Image (tube, helix red, strand yellow):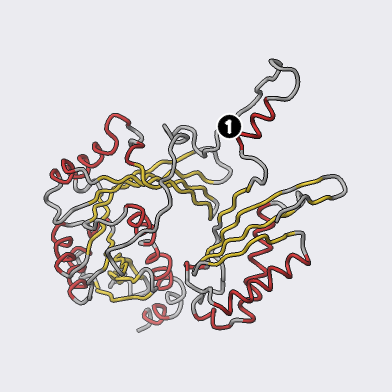
Amino acid sequence: MSRYLHKCHNVSVLLYHVVCPAKYRRVVFDEDVDAVLKEVCLEIALRYEIFFLEIGTDGDHVHFLVQSVPSYGPAKIVRTIKSLIAREVFARCPQVKKKLWGGQFWSDGYFIASVGQHANVDTIGAYVRGQGTPGNYKKLHVQQLTLFEALPDAASWQPPPHKKLHSTFKYLAACRGDSLFGRREQQGPLHLVSAWASEQGLSLGQECVPAKSNEITAIPLLLDRLHLKNTLFTLDAMGCQTKIAQQILDRGADYLLVLKANHRLDYTTVQAHFLGESAPYPSPHRLVCDAFDEGHGRLVRRRVFSSQDPALLAALSAWPSLRTVLAVESIRRVSGQAKVETQMRYFLCSGGDDPILLAQAIRRHWTIENNLHWVLRCPLGGWFFGKMTVA
C-alpha cells in the first residue's frame, strides 16, 4: 500500500508503472530468475529510495509498480532497477547468457507511466479551476495528453477492450535479402536471401541470388526447401509478387506482404481506400492499434488500420486468398528536434487473424535485420568474410 513520503522540504506520493522487456524479447524469466529478481528488488528498496509495491513477470518482460521520491526522476529509477537486476541475474543465473548472447539483459526501450493514487487528471483539473474567487480563474495553459496534436480525432479515440487473442498460425517466419561484402572486387558482394524464425531466433535457410539477377528468382527456390505449414510468412516489397504469394499458400502457410508503389494500380486502390476524403490522415474508424515507442534517440507513434471490405478485396482479386489489408502510419520525431515525419505503409495478408496480431507480426519481421543480418555483417564480417578476401 502506498504512503506519503516525508522529506525535509517536501511530502510526496509518486507512483510509477514500469514495464521492462528482456533483450530480443527472449523468454528468460523462470523460477530461478524470478527468485533473483525479487531478492534484488528488496535489496534496492533498502539501499535506495525506490519502493516496490508490486512485481510481476510475464515470460519476456517484467511489470513494476514502484514508489519513489522527487529527487529520483523516472529515468534514474529505471536505470537503477535495470542495471542492478541485470548484473545479479547474469552472476547468479549463468544459463541466461545462453539466450542473451549479446551481453545485455534488458532491451533498450521501456514503458513508464505515472499512477494516480487519489484522482485522475479530470479531478485534479476541476480542483485547480475551483481555487480562488469564482469567476476569477484564468486558464493560462492547457495541453492535451497526446504526442502529435495535428492528428485528427487522436484525443477521442479509445483503445478496444482487452481480450485474449487467438491465432490461427503457430509459427512466424520472415524472409529478406542482404548483401555481404568481403569477396574479391571482381566478384562483387555475396547476396543472400534468408528465412528467419522470428519467435525462435533461428535461421531456417539461405539461398544465394544468382549473378545478374534479383531476389525474385531466389525466393521461390528457398520456399521449396522450407516446411511452412501453419506459418505466417512475412516478406518485404521485393517478395510482393502474386506467384510468390500463391507458392506460400501451396506450402500450407499464409502470407503477409508489403505493398509498395511498384504495383501502381493496387497501391493507389489501397491508398484511396484508407485515406479517402480524410487525406493525408487515414480514417480513424478503421483504427485497431495505437502505440508509442521511445528508444535510440527518437519517439515513434504507430497507428495500425485494418480493412476486410469486400469491395476492396474484389479490386485486389489478383492476390490469391487475400483476406485482410492493413495500413501502418509511423509518426516519427527525433529527440531534440521539432520536425515530425510521417510515413504510410500498406500490407496484404491472406490470414484472417485479429489485426492486432498482424500488427505484432509486422513489427517482428524486422528481427531478421537486427538479429540475423547484423550478425552476418558485423561480427562475422570482420572474421569469416575477411578470410575470403585472401582466398
Instruction: Tell me where residue 360 sits by quadrant.
Output: bottom left
Residue 93, position in %: x, y? Answer: 59, 81
Residue farthest along the top direction in this orientation: 135
Q: Nearer the viewer, residue 36 or 197?
A: 36
Kind of residue sitting beneath label 1: Gln
Q: Could you say which is closer to the camera, residue 203 or residue 51?
A: 51
Residue 73 image offset from top left, x and y in percent: 70, 51
x, y percentage for residue 154? 44, 36
Q: Quadrant of the N terminus?
A: bottom right
Q: Is the residue 228 above or below the residue 319 in the image?
A: below
Residue drawn at point x = 30 percent, y = 64 percent: 176
Q: Position of residue 4 (x, y in %)?
A: 77, 50
- In the picture, the quarter occupied by the C terminus is bottom left
Q: Quadrant of residue 137?
A: top right
* Residue at 17% over, 74% down: 224
With 227 as the anchor, is 43 left or right in this view? right
Residue in the image at 58% along x and 43% along y: 336
Secondary structure under the numbered disc 1 in the rendered image: loop
* Neighbourhood count class around disc 1 (C-alpha, 10 Å): few under 14, some 14–19, many 20 upward: few
Q: Is residue 170 above or below residue 145?
A: below
Count numbered badges in the picture: 1
Q: Residue furthest front?
A: 1
Q: Is residue 384 left or right of residue 234?
A: right
274 relative to 126 in the view: left or right: left
In the image as oriented, which residue stretches furthest toward the right? 8
Provide the residue designation for mark 1: 143
Question: Which one is in front, 123 or 222?
Answer: 123
